[in-house]
Amino acid sequence: MAQKTAKLANGFEYTPSVGKHPRSLQPSLPARAITKIVLILVAIYFLFPLVWILFTATKTNAEMYSTNPFWFGDKIAIKENYDSLMSWSKGYYWRWVFNSILYSGAAGVIGTFISVSAGYGLAKFKFRGKNGIQLMILAALLMPIALLTVPLYMVMYKTGLTDTAWAIIIPSCVSPFGVFLGRMYAETSVPDELLEAARIDGAGEFRTFFTMVLRLLAPAMVTIFLFIFVATWNNFLLPLMMISSDAKKPVTLGLYGMMSYFDPVYGAVIQGALFGILPLVIIFLFLQRFWQAGLAAGSVKG
Amino acid sequence: MFGWAFLSPFLLFFAFSFLIPIVVSVRAAFFREVSKGGLFGGGEKVETFVGLQNFKEVALGSTFWTGIGRVLLFGAIQIPVMIIGALALALLLDSLLVNRVGFFRLGYFMPYAVPGIVAALVWVYLYNNQIGPVGRVLNIDFFGHTWILAGMANMTTWTFTGYNMLIFLAALQAIPTDLYEAARLDGASEWMIVWKIKVPMVRAAALLAVLLSIIGTVQLFNEPAAMAVKASWMGGSYMPMQMAYNTMVGTVSPSGAGPANAISIMMALVASVLAVIYAWAQKKVD
């Protein structure tokens, strides 16, 4: 690419910093080195607990006291710890992971759909009461969600939904942030001309939505799905309140029960934590750019 | 007409899990379950209107306010550390000093993938001064009165700094680079670009990040719940959200839906007052 240059007041040639920055702006070597060291130290702070989990999941209790926390013990006790994990969870462990996938997946799918539908409705239609609704959604964005858990329990109890999957899925579906993102995305990426053309061709509003609009909104949908999925997977207070039977617990609640034991087999519990984290880590790694996109959209709303 | 049609599924779920609970909560806060008496005092429970009594007991008792005090102390230190740290990291990653940001960006964000309660429980093990590397090296009793808030603050900082950093980074990358070009041509140093362009341009993002942090801090639950596994002296109402939960499930007295909802409503009020004060203060500064 041809780059424009200019003479600076002090006689230096100036090159614009498109892509790589010019040599005149190159920071000094010490500055770069210090920055790198700082960044690496910070990275160690954020990552060492995860590394510790990897090694600890393979150790017996005795070796945990005596060995280097960041290396394997003499004996690799993966199998023993796995057996303890299974017997302690009364065989429910994988059921808990499955429950988490089920609750988060269902909330993600339903929540994404109702969010983009609402966002599209707000972006592309004029109707009375629209401003009121938008204000309400904005207020809900800043609502302390955990405080709804106590009254939610009462509503679920009255409707007979406590200790069912619905008690988790229904509240987790509702994402004011999802509606907000859906609306913003619909405003910018669904052209009015396209909708007009569809109307002139005689397509109904719902047909247009399902066949065309949803396709255009796909990137926003992935982001919303991720946000709801992760938020549901990570929620602890809601299942703690709603779910009482072992068979219906999500993995966070199950692990909490195991960790609260008086004298646990640490390796087993840590192995459980590891398996409970892995699905999310994998999702994060593969869908990084959607996180970025969502956060970018979220950060300009202020 | 069609606008409503597209909105209706969301509004249905929203009503069920936001609006109805709020109404139920406000109503319940004015009632209390009272035993009908009976010969042995074990009679059927009856819901009785008690007016403002639930609120009075919460507001006049010291437990709630002690909890709020702890939350305020916690937030006053943890939120600035986290937000300034996140902003500093984002500015470094956005600067010319670093070429490969991918690894750091992902590494700092990784803790966010760990469910809050699991992260808190893992840190409880890390703090353990027999098996945990942090406890062994620092030799601090994180489960005692002196260090427990610091221990929890570290947990939330570890979990959420990367998330806030990404918000800042996204805002920084949305700034058109022409602005930097123009500033450099005018002779601005990189420091001046940071202070005069970058920081002012991420103000909106910062306001949102701080507001969400304040609201999150007031309802802190996972971290104290995890610490309580090892520090039984904390009891059931160390933090306000623990108090609300334990009041609801009956392990703290007076228990039941009425007092629990009164606590929830009071917490929501405190959170909104703090949020409004912060938003107002920032506006004043601008």
Image: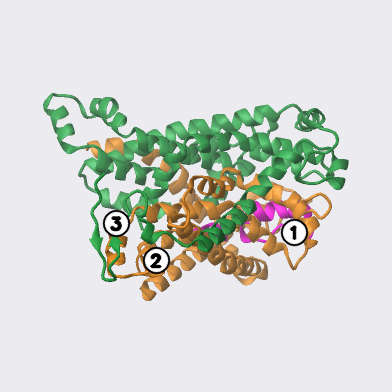
Residue B190 numbered tag: 2
Residue nearest the viewer, comparing B155 with A157:
B155
Chain A tint in image: green
Please tell me which of labels 2 and 1 falls first in the chain: 2
The residue that appears at 29% across and 52% down in the rendered structure is: A132
Secondary structure of residue under mark 3: loop
Query: At label 1, which amino acid type do we have?
Result: Gly
Residue nearest the viewer, comparing A299 with A111:
A299
Q: Label 3: chain?
A: A
The residue that appears at 51% across and 51% down in the rendered structure is: B163
- State the extent of the magenta-drawn residues as a range: B213-241
Can residue A4 be spotted in the picture? yes
The chain letter corresponding to orange is B
Residue farthest toward the left in the current orientation of the protein: A200
Number of residue marks: 3
Secondary structure of residue under mark 2: helix
Identify the residue under disc 1: B235
For the residues carrying marks 3 and 1, which lies nearer the camera in this image? 3
For the residues carrying marks 2 and 1, which lies nearer the camera in this image? 2
Quick check: is A60 in the magenta stretch? Answer: no
For the residues carrying marks 3 and 2, which lies nearer the camera in this image? 3
How far, Cα to Cα, is label 2 from label 1? 51 Å
Residue A15 numbered tag: 3
